[in-house]
Structures are given as structure tokens and as C-alpha cells.
Image (cartoon, rainbow, N blue to C red):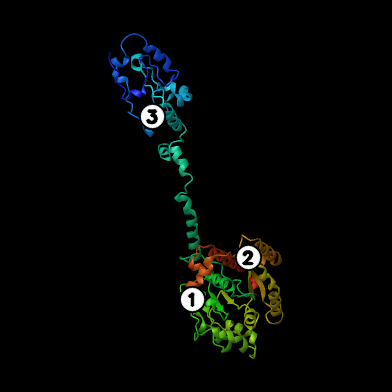
Amino acid sequence: MHDDGRYDDGSRVTAGRGGHSAAGSVSRETGPQDRSIDAPGPRPSDCDPVVHRDAPAVGPVGPSSAAERSGTAYGAGRPDDPLAEPALSHRREAVAPSLPEASPPAATALPRQPAPRAVPDAAPAVAISVDTPAPPAAAYRDDPADAAYVSRETPTREEDDPPLAMEAMRAVQILNPSGEVTMPRPERTRVMCVANQKGGVGKTTTTVNLAVALALHGNRVLVIDLDPQGNASTGLNVPHHTGVPDVYDCLINSVPLEEVAQGVEGIPNLWCVPATIDLAGAEIELVSMVARETRLDRAIAAYPGHFDYVFIDCPPSLGLLTVNALVSAQEVLIPIQCEYYALEGLNQLINNINLVRQHLNPKLEVSTILLTMYDRRTRLADAVEQDVRNHFGDKVLQAVIPRNVRVSEAPSYGQSVMTYDPGSRGATSYFEAAQEIAERGFKEPSRNA
């Protein structure tokens, strides 16, 4: 009798000719096939030895690779495989319609039977494959809809370009390289005194940036640095070291203003009268001089050229230098920091302005209030803004200067923020403030009277 040597390991199959193994009964579909073996006749294995699938010599019987396990999990294996039956029995109804018709009994008469220890090992392997998550992300490349869904979360170049494009547009608008865009020019010279006895509220920064913004758009502007610290001269990159003719010579020695005024490099329509440390002694020297309050006013009136705007940067005090600025000006621009201390001294400044108007300069008026260092994250800034707007009304500019590091960095490079970073929020805010001042002056020329 021919010995069935088709199995490499004899211990794996202990069934006799009847097809019963030591592991007990097999799946439901193998019963009828086992009974068909008891019929007389030659063994199917002798007739068709090709139907047997080679099994590994040792180890559990089941899918030998991740690909085979994956294929078994998704119904790619043979429908009559007893290894796949325990894990895929719940999928039989879904897979059966797509399976080919069963082959003749001679080809499927003897299914491969696992050893007793193979079933516990193989079943979890198949079960893990069934519970495996969806295919990796690389599989979505074949599906355009899925690919679009994945890429929707990633910012595209078009989504990043608009902020940069808007910043570039603002820079071109502020720098005005062509010179075609101009702000309204006043009918007569507007002399504006930038004053606030509290220090650190942005007087110098406001003076420099408003002057540059107006000069870049067709206005002739003169900046008079009346602060002994000389910060306005630094911001405009004008030399103001000891020995340079400055505003002190105009006040004390009656030197004409055109001899000490210097043109600002890179901005054709802007001039600056610098201030040196010598100006610190002018407060004492002016005390004994005749008409000490009007010396700056006479120097400005004697200037032969014509300016659209004259900005006077005052020191943080209410001394004789500030009084000279108030007497020579027609308008007062008050920068107010959005904090409580800035409001505390505002009442005293208004009282001094009223005294100068009554006794020295009846044309003087507070025309402009500018809120600076505004921080929208704090309730204090909102409270200060509401108080200032309720008290001064339309004199408060709609443009508000926010806290911006570019505004603080610009003086270290000898520039205003308008030329240092024209696309920044600080430059845009000062440009809007300058435009609003120009439009108000154009609509209401009576303020210059």
C-alpha cells in the first residue's frame, strides 16, 4: 500500500484514511468532504497530487507573511481554507457572491488539515489582520478625492501670499516712490506744537513719523527739535553733536533759522533744525532776556522759505522752551499714552494752554489728540480711549498707534518707521494719522487763522 508521504511532518496529521484528526472536528464545511473520502476508489491524492499546497516543515500553519495575512483578512484567500474560516465566518456572506464556482470534487476532496497547535496560533493572526486599520496614507494617492481631503489641511502658497501682498502694497503706498500720490496741502503754513509734560508718551516718535509721512506725499515739512535730548534729530539721522549749529543759536544768539536747518537724507521735502546738549542751559538763559516767550515765533516768521507744516518737538516739561513752542504754534497736537498716568497730567497741560491763549497767543487751540501705545489686549487701553474720546470728541484722531517693536527699532538705524519698515502696523497707523491730519486741515482751513 502506498504510503502518503505528502506531509513533511508526520506528527502534524494523525488522521487515517477517514480524514479524522486528533484535534477533533474541523469546520462545518469539511464534514461532507471528509465523508466523501470513505467511498471506495483511489485516493484523490494519488490521482491529483497537484492539489496539495506545500506546508512549512515546522511552526503553525497559516499565512506566512504580512501580505498573505492581509490578503486573508480581506477575503483574498481560498473560501474553503479552514484556517480562514474561524476569523472570516462573519464575512462569508459578503465574500461568497464574488467567489468563483467550486471546482470538481477531485480537486477539493482533501483539504489541508492543521495540526492541533496550529489553530490557536493561526486564528489570532487572522483576527489581527481583520482588525487592522485602514490602509496607510500612501493608498490615498490613487484616489483624487481622498488626496484633496488630505491636502485641504495644508496651507497653500495662495493662502500665504495675500498677507505678504497686502504688506507690500502698504509699503508702496507709504513710500510713494513715484511721487504721484499726494496728500492735501494746506492754504497756509500749519505750525503744530507736539506737547505733553509727561515723558515717554511718544512725542518725538509722533513728530518724526508724521513729518516723514507728509513729506513723502508732496508736503514741505520742517521739524524743530526743541528737546535737549535731541531724539528727533537722531530719528531723522541729522548730526546734532556739540559744535553743530542748532536751535539754541536761534533762541539765544538770534541766528537765522535757515542757517541751522539741515536737509534730511533720502527725503527731499523734509528739513530739520537739530538740538544739542547746549539747549539744556537755554531755560536759565532765557529767564533774563526780553520777550523770551516769543523768540522762537520770530525765528519761524523770518524764515524766507515756505513750509506746509512745521512740527515742534517739545521737551517733557512746562518750562520756557515749551512756552516758546506754544506761542509760535497755532495748533497743539497732544499724544496720549493709553495709561492712567497720561490722563493724570492732561488737565494741567490744558490749563497752561488756556493761559497762553489768554495772554500770549489767542490763535492757539488744541486741534489734534493722538492715542499712542495702544494695547488691545488690555481693558485699560479701552477705558482710556473711551474717556479721551468722550472728553475731546472729534479732536481725537480715528487712527490709533499700537504698540509695535518696529517703531522702537527704527531710531537705532537713524530712520523713521516709515522708511525702516513701511509695511509694519506702526508705519501704517502713522500714515493713516498723517492722512487724517492733512484731510482735516484741508477741509477746515479756518483752524489756521
How crowded pointer 1 is (Cα within 10 Å; few <14, some 14-19, many 20+) is rated as: many
> Mark 1: which amino acid?
Asn
- In the rendered image, which quarter contains the N terminus? top left
Q: Are marks 3 and 1 in contact (CB under 8 Å)?
A: no
Q: Quick one: SS at disc 2? A: loop
Percent position (x, y) of residue 336? 64, 69
Q: Are marks 1 and 2 in contact (CB under 8 Å)?
A: no
Q: Give the residue furthest to the top.
A: 40
> Mark 2: which amino acid?
Leu
Q: Which residue is mark 3?
A: 60
Percent position (x, y) of residue 232? 54, 76
How far apart are labels 3 and 1 at the CA level?
A: 86 Å
Up/down of 62 relative to 423, above or below: above
Q: Which mark is residue 68?
A: none
Q: Which residue is mark 1?
A: 237
Quadrant of residue 55 within the rendered picture: top left
Up/down of 198 relative to 256, above or below: above
Q: Quick one: SS at disc 1? A: loop
